[in-house]
Structure formats: structure tokens, C-alpha cells
Amino acid sequence: MASQTLSVATWNINSVRLRIEQVARFLTEQQPDVLCLQEIKTAEALFPHEVFEQLGYTHRAVHGQKGYHGVATISRVPIREMNRHDWQANGEARHVGVEVMTPEGGLILENVYIPAGGDIPDPEANPKFGQKLAFLDRMTQWAGTVERPTLIVGDFNIAPLDCDVYDHKALIKVVSHTPQEVAALGAFGAAHGWVDLGRKHIPAPERNYSWWSYRSYWRDKDQGRRLDHMWASPALADKSSAHRIVEETRKWDQPSDHVPLVTEFAL
DNA sequence: ATGCCGGTACCCTACCGA
């Protein structure tokens, strides 16, 4: 049987309703088979299902909530929703897991929105930072139980490598790049042997940003960070054939502060 | 180096994002 290709995208859209036309443009131009969205900022009742339906993305798993957070996985190949983990243990909608049904036996696709963690990198002084670390701990416990080929994607809100930020020394105490978060993400990686596809295909220290602040002085000076990730089980990672960052979306009118990533697999 | 930008909810200011 001829091998099939599957392309998977992830994008923190920062309100799917406000930017539904940008999502439609992205899908039309990039043609991913599956798209994982984060920060949809809507309950499922107001999710723009009809737009995706018309574009051929007839399979959807939406874990939304009113106003904040929320994730959705939409697909033009069959998917089956598996679960909605609450790794922050407070009810926020930050995960949806699906099985992507392919002729080759399928894969598990986990869509996550890891908490940002507030401003102060100290769990005693800042409960949000503690919640971020607790989320990573629960994710790590879960990773040790993964048995099927799995792809975990989304807004990790951590830039792990020195070259994942524009100035390592300047950001070492800034939440998203602190040693404590980087170590917690490293423990997660080790728990399953995840392969960081962004760095498989765009090796360090090459520039590989996925987020730029809305503050103009950061945008203008290209002071970005690599906060968005696609990590694969080892055997699945061997099948990734191409990976790209669609940076142009950051220059569209009223853009998200994150840009999409796309990985293609030869299954 | 800074929510100064940008979003939602709800009632216009508060809260959230990283």
C-alpha cells in the first residue's frame, strides 16, 4: 500500500471568532489535514463550526469555555475525541486529545495550552507560576503512560533553549525562559523520549520564533520567543518529513501574537 | 524595560495574556 502523508498544524489564535477569516485563509493557503487551535476564547456553543464545515474540516473536537483559554482540534480526516485532561486541576479548558484515524493505524494527537504562569517566577509569591509547574508535573506523569504513537502540540509557553529567545541572559528570570520551567519541560521530554520536531527540522541555534509581543518595540526589533511546539513519540518523529513556521501571519491585519507551525508526516 | 497592545465580559472598568 502506498504511504500516506498527513499534515498537522498548531496555532494559538487568540480568539477564533475575531480571527475566523484569518483561520480560513490559513487553511486555504496551507491545506493542513488537521489544525490544533489554542486560546479560542469561546464556549463551544459559539464556535464557528459552519466555516470549518464549508472548508471541508468536518471533524472537530472543541473544548471551549466562555471568554478565556479553550482549545479545538479540527480535521478533514476522521478524528475521534479521546479525553479532556485537566492538568491544572481547576477546570480551565487547556487540553483536548483525539485519535487521528488513518489507514496506517492512526496516531494520538494531544492539543495543549500550558498556563502562562504570571509574572514572578516563584511559586510561593505567585500561585500562577505554581500552577504552571503543577500542570507540567501532571503532564510528565501522564507522559510515562503513553503507549501509542503520539504527537503533542500547542502553546507550551516555554522557550527551552538559549537560542529560543532573542536574548538568553536578558530573559533568564523572565517567566517562559526560567531554569525551573525549562527543567520541568525537560523532565516531561525525558518521560517519553519526546522529539522536539521544531529543532529536528530547524536545528539550534537557528532562529525559530513563534511569538512576538503586541508591544511594538518588541515586534520591531524581532524580539521573539519559541513558545509553540510540536513534540512526537520517537517512532512517529522518524516519520516527520517537513516542518515550517508560517511567520507571515504575524504581519496580517490584527494578527494573533502567535504564528502557526505545520509538520508533514509520511506515514 | 514597560501590558504602552489586544482580547472578553459586562456594563465601562476589570481581568487576562507571556
Image (spheres, coloured by chain):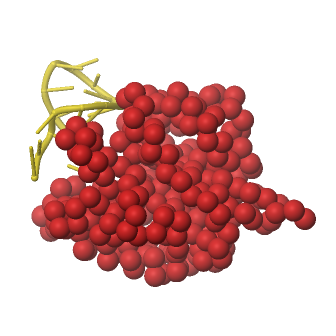
In this orientation, which residue lies closer to the viewer: A106 or A261? A261
Q: Is residue A217 left or right of residue A247?
A: left
Q: Is residue A246 above or below residue B14?
A: below
Q: Name the residue at 61% across, 36% down.
A: A29
Chain A painted colour: red
Q: Is residue A137 above or below residue A227?
A: below
Residue B16: quarter of image: top left
Q: Name the residue at 40% across, 52% down.
A: A210
Q: Position of residue A137 (x, y in %)?
A: 38, 73
Q: Position of residue A51 (x, y in %)?
A: 62, 28
Q: Name the residue at 90% across, 65% down.
A: A1
Q: How many marks?
A: 0
Q: Position of residue A4 (x, y in %)?
A: 79, 59
Do we see residue A50 in this rendering?
Answer: yes
Q: Residue furthest right?
A: A1
Q: Is residue A160 left or right of residue A228?
A: left
Do we see residue A98 in this rendering?
Answer: no
Q: Position of residue A119 (x, y in %)?
A: 18, 56
Residue A90: quarter of image: bottom left
Q: Is residue A168 left or right of residue A145?
A: left
Q: Name the residue at 26% across, 65% down.
A: A177
Q: Quadrant of the C terminus of chain A?
A: bottom right
In this orientation, which residue lies closer to the viewer: A164 or A61? A164
Chain B painted colour: yellow
Q: Is residue A169 above or below residue A27?
A: below
In this orientation, which residue lies closer to the viewer: A246 or A205? A205
Q: Is residue A146 left or right of residue B15?
A: right
